Image (cartoon, rainbow, N blue to C red):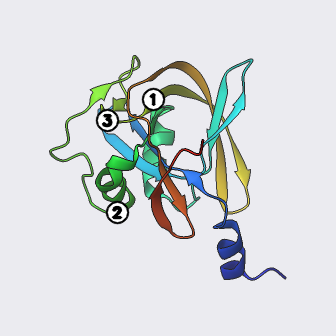
Amino acid sequence: MIDATHFRNVLGAYPTGVCLITAVDADGERTGMVVGSFTSISLDPPLVGFFPDKGSSSYKGIAKAGRFCVNVLGSDQLALCQRFASRAPDKFLDLAHGESPSGQPVFDEALAWIDCTIERTEDIGDHWLVVGRVEALDICGGDTPLLFHRGAYHSSVAID
């Protein structure tokens, strides 16, 4: 049997990028969640994915919307990350943001954004695998990603 705490500690040795997944449903309700599990899946067709916890209340809004936008966070966006990782009732309160071509929230300071429709959702253990078909994407600016490693946030340093 694998101890859950040991499992998390060992896998925490692998650094991940940090993304903010945003969506707006048909009723205009905005939702967002922070993930470190975002990944590219396929180039043809263009597919990406992320793995929300099955108990995530934020993911329910994204699933209801049927689409989402990935905001790749920069190292200067730690406060935004922490806000969306919290249980605040309205995480968008007083936050300015733009929109993706499909109308999903895009934060100007994000390094990049990826606008997707939900292609399918798979039941994977205690998480979902959400596969998104990429419809539009772009690089916004900045060059230092926000990383998560061994239970803490970091910025990257280029090695020559």
Quadrant housing residue 61: top left
Q: Which residue is mark 2?
A: 86
Q: Determine which quarter of the picture holds residue 7.
A: bottom right
Please name the amino acid that badge 2 sits on. Ser
SS at mark 2 in the image: loop
Q: Mark 3 belongs to which amino acid?
A: Glu
Q: Is residue 71 above or below residue 11?
A: above
Q: Secondary structure at mark 1?
A: strand
The vertical placement of 141 against 73, above or below, is above
Q: Position of residue 12 (x, y in %)?
A: 63, 67
Q: Amino acid at mark 1?
A: Trp
Residue 113 image label: 1
**Along the viewing direction, whichever of 130 and 82 lies nearer the viewer:** 82
**Quadrant (top left, top right, bottom left, bottom right) of the N terminus:** bottom right
Percent position of residue 57, x then y: 44, 57
- Residue drawn at (58%, 22%), measured in percent from left and top? 134
Q: Secondary structure at mark 3?
A: loop
Few, some or many residues within 10 Å of mark 3 (<14, 14–19, 20+): some
User: Looking at the picture, how far across and down is residue 21, in whole percent?
Assistant: 45, 42
Give how far apart the Cα atoms at labels 3 and 1 are.
10 Å
Residues at circles 2 and 3 in contact by the CB criterion of under 8 Å: no
Q: Earlier in the sequence, mark 1 or mark 2?
A: 2
Q: Which mark is residue 109?
A: 3
- The span from disc 1 to disc 2 (Cα, nearest Å) is 22 Å
**Residue at (24, 45) in percent of width and height:** 92
Image location of residue 133, percent across then percent down: 62, 25
Q: Residues within 10 Å of mark 2 (few under 14, many from 20)?
A: few
Q: Give me the residue at 47% from left, 44% from top.
A: 145
Number of marks in the image? 3
Left or right of 88 on screen, residue 85: right
What's the CA distance linking mark 2 and mark 3?
A: 20 Å
